[in-house]
Amino acid sequence: MAAFAAGFETNPNELRDIDGTADNAYVIRPAADTDELDDETVRRLVRTIDPVDPVEMDITRTDGVVLVDAVVEAPPEIDREASPDAQIRSKFDRYAGTVTFEHVEGEAVLLDELEVWHDGEEVTGTLFDGDEFAPGDEITVETGLIATVMVRWFDPDANVYDTYAREQVDREAFAVDYDMSAETLEISYEAERPADASNLRLVHRGEEGVQTVGEEFTDGTFDPGNAVTVTDVSIGDSVQLAFDGEEPMGGGSFIHYRARPPRVWIHSHAEDHDQVRRRGVSSS
């Protein structure tokens, strides 16, 4: 991307307090042809930058730039005092490819105010019978081996929420190896079974900005032993394997690695010489 500009109807510092909606505008000048920046990438970029939640976007291309008119609304605020006092526990079954949410104890939660999100889509209506989620109740979401799923309470009138439980699976299926001298980061998939990778993207944040990389790694299926190497990962850069779908209030990165220099400890002893310890290896 060569340039990015934004215009706000309301002061950005005050957007989170707006009542109703506001109109924001963006101008994006890609380094390459505008047609190479598809609408989904544009929407993802605006959602990343906008201080609130875009609910509508109109995208046009003209004279080498991408114009985005966005209608935005204030995001909900967390309010644990307002939500029912409920303890909901999640458990991932790696063999079955499911996540089970169990209401362990506390107050029942009305289904009118309960949401279940799976890979950016609300799936509440397909999981429950009755009108509340009470102690002893449980639901099971078929997630597969790679997924993000959450249960939250949400009051649309007050625009407040509380997240009861969240799972991002399966982090244990991946290994990360950083080579500081070569400035490379390798992420490998080490599970025993293939998994759908289409809902993930790999992002490198560094001095050159934010870049989506490793499309060949996340485009299709993870097979056991698949790996990707991200190059030019300098100290201070970060590499994230993130879910590509929308989720209320975000969900954080699935895998997040920040390149840092090795830690060094120097121990000084009056009767002996100094000892240097780096990454668990001692030298004198």
Image (cartoon, helix red, strand yellow):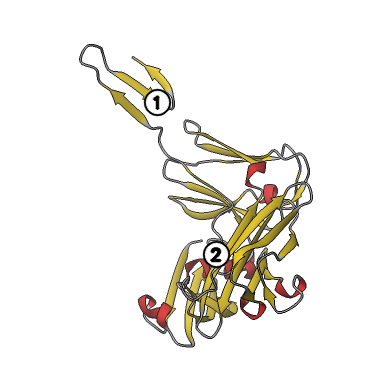
Which residue is painted at 42% across and 40% down in the image? 235
Residue 11 in sight: yes
Quadrant hosting residue 87: bottom right
Where is residue 104? Give x, y as percent: 63, 61
Which residue is painted at 53% across and 64% down in the image? 30
Q: Residues within 10 Å of mark 1 (few under 14, many from 20)?
A: few
Along the line of sight, the residue nearer the viewer: 216 or 132: 132
Residue situated furthest top in the rendering: 271
The amino acid beneath tag 1 is: Arg
Q: Are marks 1 and 2 in contact (CB under 8 Å)?
A: no
Where is residue 229? Give x, y as percent: 60, 40
- Secondary structure beneath dot 2 equals loop
Q: Where 87 sits versus 241, above or below?
A: below
Q: Which residue, given by chain and number where applicable, does mark 2 sit on?
A: 250
The amino acid beneath tag 2 is: Gly
Residue 155 horizontal side relative to residue 188, left or right: left
Quadrant hosting residue 13: bottom left
Residue situated furthest bottom in the rendering: 20
Q: Which mark is residue 278?
A: 1
Q: Which mark is residue 222?
A: none
Where is residue 71? Give x, y as percent: 53, 83
- Secondary structure beneath dot 1 equals strand
Where is residue 82? Give x, y as percent: 49, 76
- Decide which of tag 1 and tag 2 comes sooner along the chain: 2
Along the line of sight, the residue nearer the viewer: 31 or 70: 70
Along the line of sight, the residue nearer the viewer: 188 or 140: 140
